[in-house]
Amino acid sequence: MTAERETAARLPGDPGMWVFVLGDLAFFSAYFVIFMVHRGREPELFAAAQRHLSPAVAVATTLLLLTGSWLIALAVQASRAGEHRRALRLTAGTLLTGVLFMLVKAGEWAWEASHGRTFASGDFFMFYYLLTGVHLFHMLLGLVVLGVVLRELRAPGLRRTAVVETGATYWHMVDLLWIVIFVLVYLMR
Amino acid sequence: MSGAAAARTAADASGGRRRGGAVDLWICWWVLPVFYVLFGLIFVLLARVIPPPRPDRSPEEVAAFFHDHAATIRIGFAALMVVIGFTGVANGLVAHQMKRMAVSPVFAYAYIAALAVGALPGCLMAAFCFLAAVFRPGRDPHVLALLYDIGLLTFVGSLGCFTTQYLVLALAILLDRRRIFPTWMAYVCVWQIVTELLAAPVFVFKDGPLAWDGSISFYMGTVIFGIYEVCIIVLLFKAVRDQPPGEPVQD
Amino acid sequence: MNGTPGARTTRVWAALCAVTVLSWRLGTERTAGAAVTVAVLAIALVKARFVVRCFMEVQDAPAWLRRLTDVWLAALWTALVVLYLV
């Protein structure tokens, strides 16, 4: 079977989702800049507070999200090739990475909170909970989006590739945002 | 006979309930740009609630604030009392479009109900608190500080009703096969939900980006609200323009 | 493009994971200073661009989107580095 190369430039999935993604990237960029401005005013305090976090846990969650992106990218390719069962399994895999991410994040929050580091424990932890919290909300929406993709792939009358592409685009955005949060919150010295 | 004329005649025959020509809808549509311009003028220039004054003021500073701005607060918020009813028309028009969507009318009811509840904390309480504060000069600064806090906390922090409003609108748009509104508008509603949630911390912080005058809780929220309003006004314009006259709408 | 699309995607994923671990080791060095953080930020930029271009398939998207995402990446990262160093 000859593989068809897409020679024409195309926007994968629903164009409305790209509006959402680009807008969200802009809003998160504003949060990141605001974070850096506040950090610049008291860098020692931020660095000291940051030492309480575990970069190892953050690396694990980053790897989880990268794996999820990989699986959903493969799912899009499978859907294009008409391999619906494979696309379904891959999407389920992505959903699993998302659930694991949320569990780890919840555990991390519980750990920090139980050691007295809450939302109101100074600027660094305010931003920590803020950035990871807004991201977590988007992750939750992502699970709903993946649920929609799964439903689409299971229904014999549907299985539109565009739906899988739209879901994948959203998921990659969640991954992309985390890449920045990972650096700013956990690794920046 | 043309299709539109036939539809109109049929509608007239059924008691004239669904007249064509959409003049009624255009009157409703015009309420939106007029009201929101007035809203902006009132809240920004007159009442000084956008941008909000700072949460970290002492009672004496609050007393001075009310003393300095008493005249414009009175004019602005009294004017608001006259025009606030227009939001009912605006929301009715959105709800009408939601009823045209291929989803249950429950979404439209929820939209109206959420906003009916939200109007009081969303802007009326701020108005009444500030009006009461400037009603009698020489009030105790601590009483003034309390009115200041109630007014501004409700204005920025009344998020639950509006979160529901955006949620039902987003769901209705995404589930609607008729595409009365484009899907991207649902995502704009999601942005609004996020900004509403980001307003929750105003009950905790008196300064910084998450205070009621904060870069995130207030300013970003207001910018995104502005984007939302422009989008909804434009989309309503298109929806009303393209709506077939005499089209039956579910109850 | 060598190999199937799936093979390329998998290679990108493996590289992103490896580079994540690398930036973690770098970033948690006890002697980490400004240079290391800038390096870690640079690595993040490369990761981000790969996610945008390869996973999000922007490399096959219309030119305006390719340019827009590059402009966004450049603008954000410039802001982050400048705010970090100043």
Image: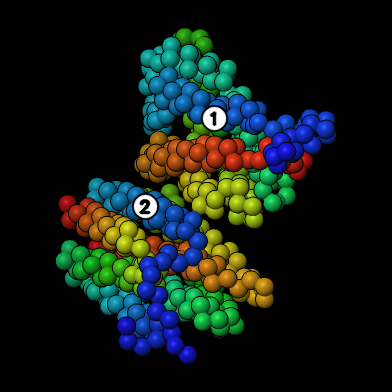
Q: Position of A128 compared to A82: left or right?
A: left
Q: CA distance from mark 2 to mark 1?
A: 27 Å
Q: Residues within 10 Å of mark 2 (few under 14, many from 20)?
A: some
Q: Name the amino acid type tagged 1.
A: Leu
Which residue shows up at 29% across the image and 48% down it? A38
Farthest bottom residue in view: A1
Give the quarter of the figure containing the N terminus of chain B. Answer: top right
Q: Is residue B4 left or right of residue B59?
A: right
Occupied quadrant, residue B161: top right
Local secondary structure at mark 1: helix
**Which label belongs to residue A26?**
2
Label 2 vs label 1, nearer the camera: 1
Where is residue C48? Give x, y as percent: 32, 67
Task: Say whether residue B149 is visible.
Answer: no
Work out which quarter of the rendered image holds the C terminus of chain B and state it: top right
Instruction: Place residue B122 in its image quadrant.
Output: top right
Q: Chain of mark 2?
A: A
Q: Which residue is mark 1?
A: B32
- In the image, residue C14 lies at what x, y percent? 35, 82
Provide the secondary structure element on which disc 2 rests.
helix
| Residue drawn at the location 38% of the way across and 17% of the way down | B64
